[in-house]
Image (tube, helix red, strand yellow):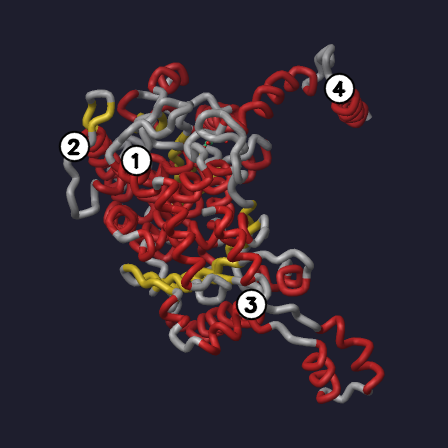
Amino acid sequence: MWQKLRAIEAQTRNRSIAESLFCAPDRASDFSLCVDGILFDYSKTNIDDETRKTLVSLAEKAGVKERRDAMLRGDKINKTEGRAVLHTALRALEGGGEDGAIMVDGEDVIAQARLTYERLKTFARDLRSGDWPGKGRRITDVVNIGIGGSDLGPAMALRALGPYADGPRCHFVSNVDGADLRDTLHGLDPQTTLIIVASKTFTTLETMMNARGALAWLEQGCDAPMDQMVAISSAPDETDRFGIKRENVFGFGDYIGGRYSIWGPVGLAVMVAVGPENAAAFLRGGAAMDAHFATAPLDENMPVLLALVGLWHQKFCGYPTRAVIPYEHRLARLPAYLQQLEMESNGKSVAMDGSPLAHGGGPVVWGEPGTNGQHAFFQLIHQGQDVVPCEFLVGAEGHEPDLRAHHDALVANCLAQSEALLQGRGLEAARNSLISKGYSRHDAERLAPHKVFAGNRPSTTLVYPKLTPYVLGQIIALYEHRVFVEGVILGLNSFDQWGVALGKELADGLIPAVAGGDLPEDINGSTGALLRYIHVCRKA
Ligand code: F6P
């Protein structure tokens, strides 16, 4: 199948996407899919019927359906860690569909998750109404301390759901750089601030340092600091060791990966800010996408198609990166969120059995919201030598009816960018445009090459009605499943992340030397020189 797709690519490489659209008036509907209000348009790519059929066969042969079913029923598909992968179970709690038992190691995951979910809702309601902690002053601010999946998910979602946030103000601290903690706590009152320490392992260096710093801050300014600290973790022994009261700990099973954890207790800050009803709508959106992913045929399955279009561009067309450009300012953290989701999941070199991957790992993902990105990196996207497939996202409606003209301009810019990538502008058109603007023939000749756009550059567009909690749930679940499908086809385990371990270990070993201790004997010349220079600067 890989061979066949390579051959198809060689034949179709120079095909004009614009011409395909022009010659096949139904292409826009044939190469798009609408599911529960979300439209995915991939007609501005050079994928044709044969390519799509062959890509779908690739997914079938790779066992996407079987692996999907295995994941959803709780098999331990995360083989290197011996774990099930059940973030989907968390959204089943509000899905409105079946939420029968899913057994892992003899325990009913759904029943466990439901108990925690009910506690979270009570906690969020009490906090929002001022009934928690019951003795102190009303909580006005919540600080979520976490990193990676324990930060990016809630930070991204809270920004996205700004119009629904009517509870305490939520802030996020992630970086071990003390500036993050200091700047976030600045201006907050320890008596009215709740600290959430979110860490699956409760051993992550950054989070534990920040948690200790926050505790010291509480101790200086309130009577019962531990009453204002809540932990979200899978490691109750560690939360005990830190001194967090058991009634303030919200746990989750090891079958919830960090970068898939927004749906459970890690989403507490979001629930506090937007309320349990909106948080439930987010889960329902995720569950609706799960139901679609679980049942739709592969060639009408949105996550599968997103994955196949991505693989086509990366593995067959040879475009190593993908830009995600939400034309929705409140999705500003989505690219960062997707970077962890995609690159921590699929940025790998070995297959399940440890052998080198036959076709390599997943792509580099990057991006920024439009229209800001247009004034930064779009130059390269339009005229650079490397083709960057763009994934645009845009809502038909905004949340600011009184600023309708802004939203119209936003949508127009989104559509215009994909149009420009598609059409480009040839040398003659560039020359004529200059002449029509009054340039001399000589200047027009000179400037025209700088104004040429190669065009024929692929992009896809995801249109949703409006960024509601439900729609956000759909979008995040869509991307999660897309990453899963990519991983299955590439033959890797999307659910471990050993690649982050080495740097962490080395950092632990270097901290004493940075703090002024002796340099490790085995330190290499370059790192040793950097350290010595840092010491010189510190003494100056
Ligand atoms: O960066 C590695 C990682 O383990 C991520 O997978 C995870 O989201 C993050 O660190 C934080 O981990 P924890 O929630 O255990 O603090």
Marks 1, 4: nearer the viewer: 1
Could you say which is closer to the camera, residue 401 or residue 352? 352
Question: What's the residue type where badge 2 is placed?
Answer: Ala
Q: Name the residue under label 2.
A: 101
Residue 142 seen in the current view: yes
Marks 3, 2: nearer the viewer: 3
Q: Earlier in the sequence, mark 1 or mark 4?
A: 1
Q: Mark 3 points at which residue?
A: 15
Image: 180 above or below 536: below
Where, by quadrant of the figure, is residue 91 drawn?
top left
Q: In this view, does 333 lie to the left or right of 92?
A: right
Q: Mark 4 points at which residue?
A: 524
Q: Earlier in the sequence, mark 3 or mark 4?
A: 3
- Element type at mark 1: helix
- Element type at mark 2: loop
Residue 168, image x, y percentages? 36, 45
Marks 3, 4: nearer the viewer: 3
